[in-house]
Image: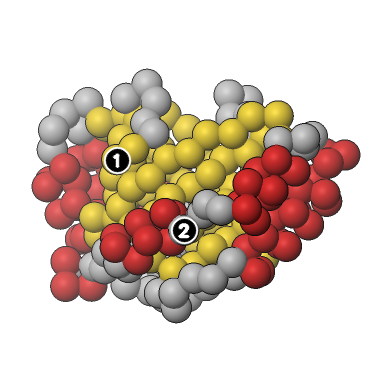
């Protein structure tokens, strides 16, 4: 994956700064004419569904993506506790849930779900509205070296928002199993993200060299937050 350095330069601590983030994503394909209706249905359900304080639910649009990605919206559920995330997912049942799913089925063309966990992050709890995911196919079982290289990168680079590397554990496709996810405060920051000095460029290059030997770039997409719960 010789172009990974270029991709990261254009777009997007040591291990002691890492934190576990467990997540469950639902990707939705919705026609533009039905987007506001779906947003209302999502808001009505998740605004009234009980959850623990360590679980977050975010509903976002996906305005930037490659042609193979059909999803237009994403519901992201996350927690630092795998048990809390599992408990919340298991709570999605009953009369209100069935009614919600029944209504959504009238407006959602297709959907899919995936789940995973972070392996290392910069520890930021900043809740920025724009997030980008880069997805990779692991070609070599070298996750420890990838995590170590990413740890060195985020230690030497001043990321303003959240950034982390992790695994897609459930719902993978075509060998996609590794991701990097970062957030931005606004679109201008997203446009201007990248190395700003020789030191930062060197850090990106060193990380890319390790990734080149272990993973193949697959795709990326960018989400914009509509509402969090």
Q: Residue at x 46, y 58 (%)?
A: 91
Residue 168 in sight: yes
Number of residues whose C-alpha sits closer than 10 Å to that of mark 2, classed few (under 14), some (14–19) or many (20 or more): few
Q: Secondary structure at mark 1?
A: strand
Q: Residue at x 83, y 41 (%)?
A: 34
Q: Position of residue 87 (x, y in %)?
A: 37, 61
Q: Position of residue 223 (x, y in %)?
A: 60, 51
Quadrant of the rendering where the C terminus is positioned = bottom right
Of circles 2 and 1, which is in front?
2
Q: Is residue 36 above or below residue 154?
A: above
Side (left or right) of 59 relative to 198: right
* Residue farthest right in this picture: 33
Q: Residue at x 39, y 25 (%)?
A: 173
Q: Residue at x 48, y 47 (%)?
A: 25
Q: Is residue 76 above or below residue 141?
A: below
Q: Secondary structure at mark 2?
A: loop
Number of numbered discs: 2
Q: Is residue 75 above or below residue 227?
A: above
Q: CA distance from mark 2 to mark 1?
A: 21 Å
Picture quadrant of residue 57:
bottom right
Look at mark 1 in the image and give the residue it sits on: 169
Picture quadrant of residue 176:
top left
Report the front residue among 219 and 59.
59
Report the front residue among 128 and 73.
73
Look at mark 2 in the image and give the residue it sits on: 91
Q: Position of residue 141 (x, y in %)?
A: 13, 33
Residue 187 in sight: no
Residue 195: mark = none
Report the front residue among 75 and 154.
75
- Mark 2 or mark 1, which has the lower sequence index? 2
Side (left or right) of 39 relative to 95: right
């Amino acid at each position: 994956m010789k172009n990974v350095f270029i991709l990261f330069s254009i777009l997007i601590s040591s291990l002691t700064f890492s934190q576990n983030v467990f997540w469950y994503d639902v990707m939705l394909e919705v026609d533009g004419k039905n987007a506001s209706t779906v947003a209302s249905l999502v808001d009505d359900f998740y605004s009234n569904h009980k959850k623990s304080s360590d679980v977050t639910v975010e509903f976002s649009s996906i305005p930037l993506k490659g042609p193979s990605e059909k999803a237009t919206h994403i519901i992201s559920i996350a927690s630092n506790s795998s048990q809390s995330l599992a408990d919340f997912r298991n709570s999605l049942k009953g009369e209100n849930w069935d009614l919600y799913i029944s209504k959504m089925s009238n407006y959602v063309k297709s959907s899919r779900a995936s789940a995973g966990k972070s392996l290392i992050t910069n520890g930021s709890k900043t809740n920025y509205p724009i997030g980008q995911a880069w997805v990779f196919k692991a070609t070599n079982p070298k996750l420890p070296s990838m995590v170590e290289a990413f740890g060195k990168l985020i230690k030497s680079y001043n990321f303003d928002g959240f950034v982390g590397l992790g695994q897609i554990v459930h719902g993978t496709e075509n060998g996609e199993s590794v991701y990097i996810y970062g957030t931005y405060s606004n679109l201008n920051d997203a446009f201007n993200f990248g190395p700003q000095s020789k030191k930062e460029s060197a850090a990106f290059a060193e990380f890319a060299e390790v990734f080149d030997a272990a993973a193949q770039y697959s795709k990326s997409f960018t989400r914009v937050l509509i509402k969090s719960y």
